[in-house]
Image (cartoon, rainbow, N blue to C red):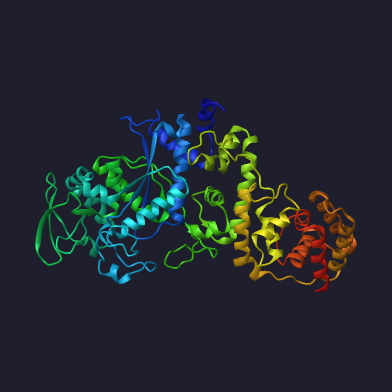
Amino acid sequence: MSMNDLIAAARVNKAWPFQEAQRLLKRYPDGVKPDGSPVLFETGYGPSGLPHIGTFQEVLRTTLVRRAFEAMIGAKPEDGKTRLVAFSDDMDGLRKVPDNVPNQALLAKHLGKPLSRIPDPFEKGHESFAAHNNAMLRAFLDRFGFDYEFIAANDMYNSGRFDAALKQVLRKNQAILDIMLPTLREERRRTYSPILPISPSTGRVLQVPVEVVDPEAGLVRFQDENGASVEQTVLGGTAKLQWKVDWAMRWYSLGVDYEMYGKDLTDSGVQSGKIVEVLGGRKPEGLIYELFLDEKGEKISKSKGNGLTIEEWLSYGSEESLGFYIFPNPKSAKSLHVGVIPRAVDDYWQFRAALPTQELDKQLGNPVWHLLRANGGWQAEEAPGAGDTLPVTYGLLLNLVGVLGAEADREAVWSYLANYVEDADPAKHPELDVLVGTALAYNREFVAPTLKKRAPVDGERDALKALDCALQVIAPDMPAEEIQTIVYEIGKREEFGFENLRDWFKCLYETLLGSEQGPRMGSFIALYGVENSRKLIAGALDR
């Protein structure tokens, strides 16, 4: 594939990252900013809590748009035509003590202070609570190989790099108030100010009326917590901005061109967009994405603990499957619970296997094409691993582990895989070995406690006896497809009374595996072994 072919195909492709990147191309038709600087993508992080799956999805999706834009302008990642900034709002005041951190009494003493000026409750040697969480963010993003630049609000405010933008906020103070005050309740209007000075007496971020004294000098006047009238600068880390103003100021100061955000920030995006224009900047392009839901369809809440963490997903699935699950339809809400993991793993591998043989337009719509490019690959269909397949599906692996029971271990699973997989050696199949471990964990936590094999009834018993007789005479190494044909033919026989093949397979799943759904039985029998499968049938008949 030539670069010109890629550019032409990318510019007309309907996959959502290309549709988002198309908006950037309209912003900069030549693919570059007027001053020649890189097109800037940004993601935001609030370090009052640890990074989570929402952080991951925002950085991943933004990266996908970044790579799509590069494809449209014929740039490779190493060309430096784009940047991705992960911004931490660590000057925000601590509003409440999080439930899931140690030394809560320590944090309670520092309520209201900037997160970057509160001691580290984790006692890990970091200079502040925010520094600890920022380090966790960087480790989190590095774990997944994201290409990004980390910027902390604390560094920008304290170093003076935001000073010019802060002076502009002071100059436009009344215009900003004209935007914000109509959106606030009467009580809030009386204390609202775009500027949040930091108390010289307590170090807390203050929500008080502020009078602008001298915009060019950065001077303001306000009443401190002790009642004193204070005149001080807002420069050099002595103040921060209200959230919506801060967001707009960041866009203005850094020159952000693209930032996506969740549906819950829709109103903030509208107001911040107006404010950045008042400051003399331009609102970034961006996607408003839907939020994650739990298995009951309720919004995921950190305080409720009804979500699924990154660690939980990686305990029961793979990194690639998480990205694959997040990829489609960002404007539609997604249910995020452990039940979606097995399908995501198998779908990822199905799309990955298909990638090299697809026409270019189909490749560009394949989620795996985007995921393989996310961290630097240019021609994703030629990337290491493109076109690979798993020798067994994750669903089949889960069924095997389910039959082996909660006490099964890695060695036992691999001994059965030898019936089905050529060169059944974990060292030769490292990605499968990862899934063996996650399948064991998934089975132990979610499958084994729910398995309940029922007894066969009426014609089901005769059908199972017929299957046992057929298995008795076949070769132990009969291919899975031939075994599947035998299973099909038995299910079609009228004397057993199945209305359709679905009923026959439901019988097999419920009596032999103890679940309502299951694998292709030919594949399962080949994997589990003919004689072992006959023992399952005998157990069902005895039941």
Position of the N terminus, as image quadrant, is: top right
Q: Image point 45% across, 52% down: which residue?
A: 56
Instruction: Name above or below for residue 249 compared with residue 185.
Output: above
Q: Image point 11% across, 46% down: which residue?
A: 217
| Along the viewing direction, whichever of 235 and 527 lies nearer the viewer | 527
The answer to whether residue 358 is left or right of residue 86 is right
| Residue 413 picture quarter | bottom right
| Along the viewing direction, whichever of 107 and 369 lies nearer the viewer | 107
Instruction: Name above or below for residue 322 compared with residue 284.
Output: below
Residue 424: x and y, percent? Answer: 70, 50
Residue 318: x and y, percent? Answer: 56, 53
The answer to whether residue 88 is left or right of residue 480 is left
| Residue 95 picture quarter | bottom left
| Residue 526 picture quarter | bottom right
Q: Image point 17% across, 51% down: which residue?
A: 234
| Along the viewing direction, whichever of 373 and 503 lies nearer the viewer | 373
Residue 375: x and y, percent? Answer: 48, 41
| Along the viewing direction, whichever of 282 and 531 lies nearer the viewer | 531
State the residue lying farthest toward the bottom: 543
Residue 391: x and y, percent? Answer: 69, 48
The answer to whether residue 343 is left or right of residue 129 is right
Q: Count the marks: how many?
A: 0
Is residue 144 among the parts visible in the rendering? yes
